Amino acid sequence: MNKKNSLILALDVLSRDKALELTEQLVDHFDAIKVGYPLILHAGLGIVEEISSISPVIADLKIADTPNTNRLICEAVLGAGADAIIAQAFPGKDSLVACADCAESFGADLFVVTEMSHPGAEQFMAPLAERMARLAVESGASGVVAPATRPERIRMIRSIIGDKLIISPGVGAQGGSAGEALQAGADYLIVGRSVYGSADPVAQAKELAAQVEQSRRS
Ligand code: 3DU
C-alpha cells in the first residue's frame, strides 16, 4: 500500500453500482478501499476483483477461525484480488500464522485487530490488546488495527509494535478525531459513513486530506 493520503475508505455500501461509482469518484483521495461483509455479501466476491482493478483493496473479513478455515478464506479473497486482509488475533497464534503465511504467498499485507473502536470493545478486547499486538508482531503481520476513538490506546499499541503499520477506524461517525489519531501514531485513518454517506463525498475527502496535512505540519 502506497502511503500518499494516509486515508482508507471503508466502503460499506450495499450495491455494486454504488460501490463502483464511489470508487471512481474517490480513488485519488484514498490510498486503499476497505470492503467487508456488508458489500461482499450483497454484491458478491466479484466486487473485490472489480474494485481492485481501480484501487488497492483491503478485505475486512475480520477472519477468526481455525487455521485451515482461515487459510481457505484468505485464499478466496486474496485470489479475488485483495491486496490486504484483516484478521482477529483472539483465535490464537496458529490461526493468525495461517493468515500471515497465506498473505505472504500472495505478496499481500495482513492487519491484525488489537482493540476495536466501539464502546463494547472495552469489555473483552481492551484488557487483551497488548498481548494481541505482540502476537501480531510475532506472527509476521504488516500491521494492526487500533481505535481512533481512543488515541491513548494507539500510543500504547505503537510502543509495542515498533514500526509496523497502524490503520485506525473510528474517525467521523464514531466520534474519533483525525488529528488526534495521527498524532498518537496512526499511519492510516479508516473512514466510512462520514464520507460515503455525505451529500458530497469528494468534499468530505478533501476536508479529511486537509486535516491529515495539518497534522503532518504540526
Ligand atoms: O464508522 P465508519 O462508518 O467510519 O466505518 C468504520 C469502518 O471500520 C467499518 O467498516 C467498520 O467495520 C470498521 N472497523 C471499525 O469501525 C472498528 C474496528 O475496530 C475495526 C474495523
Image (cartoon, rainbow, N blue to C red):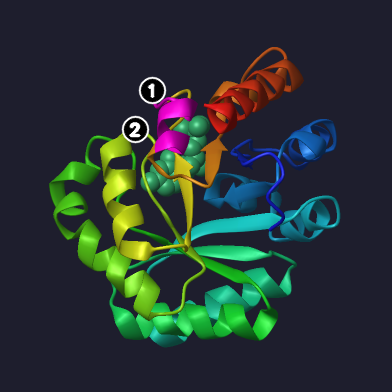
Between the residue at mark 1 and the residue at mark 2, the CA separation in whole angstroms equals 6 Å
* Residue reaching furthest to the top: 199
Q: Is residue 25 visible?
A: yes
Query: In the rendered image, which quarter contains the N terminus?
Result: bottom right
Residue 216 figure quarter = top right
CB at mark 1 closer than 8 A to ligand 1? no
Q: Position of residue 56 (x, y in %)?
A: 74, 55
Specify few, some or many for label 1: CA neighbours under 10 Å numbering under 14, 14-19, or 20 or more: few
The stretch of residues the image draws in magenta is 174-183
Q: Which mark is residue 149?
A: 2
Q: Is residue 147 left or right of residue 2?
A: left
Q: Residue at x 69, y 55 (%)?
A: 57
In the displayed structure, would residue 95 be above or below residue 23? Answer: below
Type of residue at label 1?
Gly
Disc 1 marks which residue?
A: 175
Type of residue at label 2?
Thr
Q: Residue at x 42, y 45 (%)?
A: 185
Q: Is residue 180 magenta?
A: yes
Q: Is residue 48 magenta?
A: no
Circles 1 and 2, Cβ within 8 Å, touching? The answer is yes
Report helix, strand or loop for mark 1.
Answer: loop
In the displayed structure, would residue 20 be above or below residue 73? Answer: above
Residue 63 figure quarter = bottom left
Q: Residue at x 50, y 59 (%)?
A: 61
The total number of labels drawn is 2
Please tell me which residue lies in front, 43 or 161: 161
Q: Position of residue 36 (x, y in %)?
A: 56, 51
Specify few, some or many for label 2: CA neighbours under 10 Å numbering under 14, 14-19, or 20 or more: many
Q: Is residue 66 visible?
A: no
- The prevailing secondary structure element of the residues shown in magenta is helix
